Image (cartoon, grey):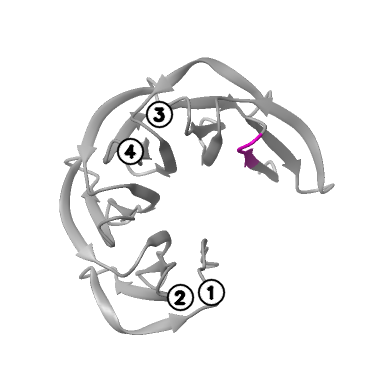
């Protein structure tokens, strides 16, 4: 365990590396234009960062905190990214291309491009079922991708402006934050159906994370 946190800084086109033991910034890593989201591969100790304006992904060597070259071209306006340990792949939402790029962690190349709805944004993964969940902003929906076949298998109407989501593998639930509804809806991960309750939030919530053992 490295106890390092990686923060994407959009306006300065870099990533801050924070040492959790000392709570200090120990490195600043240059990346592409408008860094947005990051995902960590704990096996290879690599961190992938989406660069929204340069339409690519930067790979950071976690042992040296330096960027590797070249970057990985993806679709237009890449936003969310998540690592799937089941298949050793990354999934990147391309907001303006209405697609999800699949990056092989070994070759660091895009091996598939999956059409989804209009303006995909956040991505999260449930490794035990090998399913990938993507919020779709304009369609007000949640896309479900099969990690084995790399195909879209479901699109679930979810609420107004679903900006973020979080998977809880212990309870087998998916929490989706609907920003313009000011609420969080919850799906049963076994059936991908919405449960008959929702959590009210403050005005226009933007991000969610779930703490589990």
Label 1 belongs to which residue?
203
> How far is disc 3 from disc 1 in space, using C-alphas?
38 Å
Residue farthest to the bottom, as pictured: 196
* Disc nearer the start of the sequence (4/2): 4
Q: Quadrant of the rendered structure where residue 191 is?
A: bottom left
**Front tag of 3 and 2:** 2
Magenta residues, dominant SS class: strand
Task: Specify the segment rendered in magenta.
Answer: 7-11
Instruction: Tell me where residue 85 appears, x and y as whole percent.
Output: 39, 43
Label 3 belongs to which residue?
105
Badge 1 crowding class, 10 Å Cα cut-off, few under 14, some 14 to 19, many 20 or more, is few
Label 2 belongs to which residue?
182
> How far is disc 4 from disc 1 in space, using C-alphas?
26 Å
Q: How many marks?
A: 4
Badge 4 crowding class, 10 Å Cα cut-off, few under 14, some 14 to 19, many 20 or more, is some
Relative to residue 117, is residue 93 drawn left or right? right
Relative to residue 207, is residue 73 drawn left or right? left
> How far is disc 3 from disc 4 in space, using C-alphas?
24 Å
Label 4 belongs to which residue?
96
Figure quadrant of the C terminus = bottom right
- Secondary element at tag 2: loop
Q: Quadrant of the rendered structure where residue 168 is?
A: bottom left
* Residue at 32%, 56% in the rendered image: 128
187 in magenta:
no
């Amino acid at each position: 365990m490295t106890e390092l946190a990686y923060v994407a800084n959009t306006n300065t086109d870099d990533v801050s590396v924070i040492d959790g033991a000392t709570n200090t910034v120990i490195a600043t890593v240059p990346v592409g234009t408008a860094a947005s989201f990051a995902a960590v591969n704990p096996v290879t100790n690599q961190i992938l960062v989406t660069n929204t304006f340069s339409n690519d992904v930067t790979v950071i060597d976690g042992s040296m905190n330096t960027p590797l070259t070249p970057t990985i071209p993806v679709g237009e306006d890449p936003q969310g990214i998540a690592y799937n340990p089941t298949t050793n792949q990354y999934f990147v939402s391309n907001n303006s291309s209405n697609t999800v790029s699949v990056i092989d962690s070994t070759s660091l190349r895009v091996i598939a491009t999956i059409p989804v709805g209009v303006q995909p944004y956040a991505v999260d993964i449930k490794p035990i079922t090998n399913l990938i969940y993507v919020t779709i902003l304009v369609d007000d929906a949640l896309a479900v991708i099969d990690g084995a076949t790399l195909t879209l298998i479901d699109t679930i109407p979810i609420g107004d402006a679903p900006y973020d989501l979080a998977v809880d593998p212990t309870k087998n639930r998916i929490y989706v934050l609907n920003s313009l509804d000011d609420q969080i809806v919850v799906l049963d991960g076994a059936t991908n159906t919405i449960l008959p309750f929702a959590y009210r939030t403050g005005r226009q919530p933007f991000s969610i994370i779930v703490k589990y053992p």
